Amino acid sequence: MDLKDEYIKFMEQNGHKQIPSAPIVPKDDPTVLFNTAGMQPLVPYLLGKAHPYGKRLCDYQKCVRLTDLEEIGDKTHHTFFEMLGNWSLGDYFKNESIKFSFDFLTKVLNIPVSRLAITVFEGDDKIPRDEVSAKRWEELGISKNRIAYLGRDDNFWIAGETGPCGGDTEIFYWRSDDEIPKGFDTNDERWVEIWNNVFMEFYQDEDGNITELSQKNVDTGMGVERVVALLEGYDDNYKSSIWKDVILKIEEITGLPYEGNEKAMRVVADHIRTATFIAADDAGIKPSNNGQGYILRRLIRRAIRYARNLNIDINSDFDKQIALIIIDKYGNYYDELSRNKDIVLDVLEKEKIKFNRTLEKGLREFDKLTKNNQNEINKDIAFKLYDTYGFPIEQTIEEANERGMTVDYEGFKEKFKEHQAKSKAGSIGKFKGGLAGTSEMEVKYHTATHLLNAALKIVLNSKDSHQMGSNITPERMRFDFTCDHKLSKEEIKEAEDIVNKWIKEDLTVVRKEMTKDEALKSGAECRFIERYPDEVTVYEIGDVSKELCGGPHVKHTNVLGHFKIVKEEASSAGVRRIKAVLED
């Protein structure tokens, strides 16, 4: 039984339409580097926009989360994972949602009711206790002793400080061979959360006031890796059928058993899987020193570091062997893996060669920096080797031991924690958008990217110049595009002039709904057309730009102000990057 197939089949039998998995790299959400949850691509529809597939939706979604990268190596964390989700956009609500979840778990997956427990929102001074959900669970056979009421920290959901919000109900599974207790102790780690149903029925404004929503939505999420491991009786996800073939391949390559080498094998398996999915994405991400490219580079290099710990010859094709298993395993679900197989293998190979050079350089810098430190490598040197030269701390310790030196490892960990805290703060800041809303300036910049995309085709005299990615904040826009050379000052000036000419002409921005075939026939720019549903949105700006896009956009271009390019640089091979601002 394949969990994804069974889930989609069940939801379709209950009136849901399967929507395509959104790409790893969000096309129209500049607030995050990667899609981190199944609901993320559905933000506009949760806010009230009509979805072309209807009001009942389901999918399996590719996700990447990086806030706990250093935790990868334990039994349960992954950088890439799949989420199963079903949504109601103003259609059914709590009673039906809970029944769908209960029936799938108990009738399709055959999980005994005795192994299930539930949490619901206990309410507060603004929102009442969720007795509706609790009553529904009881009607379905869950004992009162197995239903716990928890507060906002555990069972309440809101994206950002304002926006749609509401309580949720979470389903827990007893993962232990111990006798199942009659009651539900939420602090007992043998109870593991497997499904979360969020009920968006309220809106919280900037002053904290709560009002009821006219469109009440349901958003659910269930992690594939966790549930498969539970169903197969493992407390270690990497022993489940999802990972078994990959781990066996690593054992074959190394000649070592999984037992005793768990952390290194988990890191190699996880990071190569994630790198494979990122490199296969049609956004064309390549290893670099910023954005998604930096994450891709970091994952590949961390996998190589741990491969060295397993005595793998990193000049061998170990990474390709693992990647090919991943491509074969997931290719039927995500066709970009098969289409872009050669790209994935090329990315892995080139980055491995670069990292080998980095290690060699790191060794030279190690010798320079430690020349006058006879006994101990202090925390500053250890962290500089790590942060500036990409030299792993494990490698520093190994090299120091060979020279009869010690390393201030505790001091290094303190500096690393400071670095990690700053990185996490930055990641949190990246998710300030989503359901919390989009600012007026971000909407302006979104429209400006369309104008710049059209202008570059004129400047470069090439219809083959395409957008490869963008990032927008209230302060500036970043735009990546295909180009084989550094733009000259004249080309930059021409692009600016064209965009500003269109802004002054006060072109009208028109939003149209049509089928994909109609969009293609109309001449709309629509790269990666396979990502889109059958019904699409096309934005036309005068007669200069026509693109598939989820929006939002301004109504007239004259509100944008003066467009100015502040920087042009390389992003990755064959891709250039422009940073620009809109001035009053």
Image (cartoon, grey):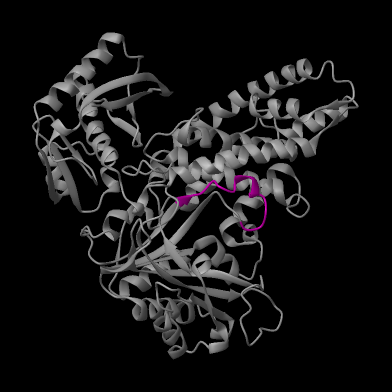
Task: Identify the residue at image location x=39%, y=81%.
Answer: 99
On whether residue 75 falls in the magenta region, the answer is yes
Magenta-tinted stretch: 63-76
Provide the major secondary structure of the magenta segment. Answer: loop
Horizontal side, residue 108 vs residue 384: left or right: left
Q: Position of residue 385 (x, y in %)?
A: 70, 25
Q: Answer with left or right where residue 305 lies relative to residue 328.
A: right
Q: How many marks?
A: 0
Judging depth in this view, the residue of 335 and 42 nearest the camera is 42
Instruction: Check residue 45 for magenta coloring.
Output: no
Q: Is residue 517 above or below residue 179?
A: above
Quadrant of res 37 = bottom left
Q: Residue at x 32, y 55 (%)?
A: 43
Q: Is residue 91 left or right of residue 258?
A: left
Residue 17, percent across and down?
Answer: 28, 65
- The answer to whether 286 is drawn above or below residue 485 in the figure is below
Can residue 461 be seen in the rendering of this structure?
no
Residue 108 lies, with reference to residue 257, above or below; the image says below
> In the displayed structure, would residue 212 be above or below residue 111?
above
